[in-house]
Amino acid sequence: MLELLKNTNFDFIGFRNKAFIISAILIILGIYAFAMVVFGKANLSVDFTGGTNLQIRFAEQVDIGTLRKVLADEGISDVQIQEVSGTKDFFIKTKLSDTEKETIQTKVASIFTNQLPGKRFEVLGSNMVGPGVGKELKNYAIIAVCLALIGIIAYIWYRFTFISGIAATIATFHDVIVVLGVFYILNKELNLLIITALLTIAGYSLSDTVVVFDRIRENMGTMKSRDDFGKVINRSINEVLSRTIITGISSILALGSLMVVGGDVLFDFSLALLIGLIIGTYSSIFVASPLVFLWRKTIR
């Protein structure tokens, strides 16, 4: 396998205190963002707040940017538009709901008729997501993330030790909550696709942590009683560092392509995965491994 870095000898454990300070700041930001999500104060999508979903089919090709601009000019700026690949269909989601005087379907159809003359279209379907359904989906999303973290503890406990499971779970929670915090600061919309990204990040972070833990376990098998556990961890991380970098670069190239050619719908999803990839690599080295080191140091 290609090896970018050979015979590295970085002192990762020696950097743990500074890394913990950085992580603590990021986690506080993430917890604040999580609280805003729970209380409905974040930029939540129609999936979580309720609103109206429309499916519209045009007879001619229409640019998605044009549709977004036309709606924004008419006061519907808080809208999510998704183009169905290979067709002229569009899914339009807005947080606006029907009123007694006018339905959202009628309003959007009127805007397109007036602002896009010559562009024939038909409304294929319309449905409204009530606030109760949105709240239920939000609760299910939170439960899904929590169950994923519990599953990580069980898996790592089975593969390694209970403390390793706790360390891996803390690192995974760290990654998910940091991405959530960054998206809150950027005022990015949180939807079901972003929840999917968060669960994917949890899986990637776990995979990266398992690789490091597995090498630590192998090196502990050859460790002499006089060997320092911190040196064993440093040696283990340095041994898999090249693999980690190559995996990260490969993933970054794929996500970069999605961000460039995937359109607006996939941009935020790809951005979440990209941030999660970077943070996940960081946490497996500077969060999970140092936590195992501190536990072993404490019991001694």
Image (tube, rainbow, N blue to C red):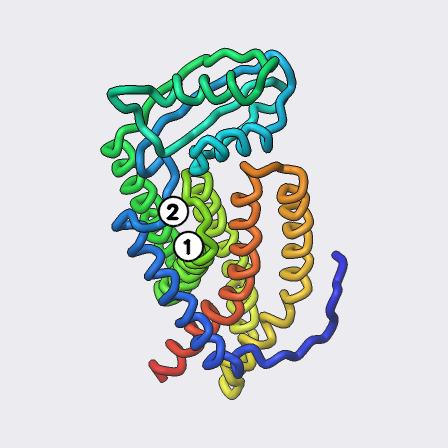
Q: Is residue 259 left or right of residue 138?
A: right
Please provide percent x and percent y for residue 277: 55, 55
Residue on which disc 2 sits: 43
Q: Is 89 left, or right, of 9 in this rendering?
A: left
Q: Residue at x 31, y 28 (%)?
A: 97
Picture coordinates of residue 157, whole percent (x, y):
38, 58
In depth, the one of 142 and 187 nearer the eye is 187
Residue picked out by circle 1: 184
- Residue shown at the point (55%, 62%) measured from the top left: 281
How far apart marks 2 and 1 lie (CA) works out to 7 Å
For the residue labelled by badge 2, is the local secondary structure a helix, a strand or a loop? loop
Q: Are marks 2 and 1 in contact (CB under 8 Å)?
A: yes
From the viewer's perspective, is 287 left or right of 32? right
- For the residue pair 121 and 40, the one nearer the viewer reads as 121
User: Compared to 173, does 266 lie above or below?
Assistant: above
- Looking at the rendered structure, the kind of residue marked 1 is Tyr
Secondary element type, mark 1: helix
Q: Residue furthest bottom?
A: 226
Query: Residue 178: x percent and y percent?
Result: 44, 60
Q: Between residues 270 and 254, which one lies in front from this camera angle?
A: 270
- Tell me, for residue 279, which label it has, or none: none
At 52% from the left and 52% from the top, the residue drawn is 204
Q: Position of residue 84 (x, y in %)?
A: 56, 23
Would you say residue 225 is visible in this rendering?
A: yes
* Quadrant housing the C terminus: bottom left
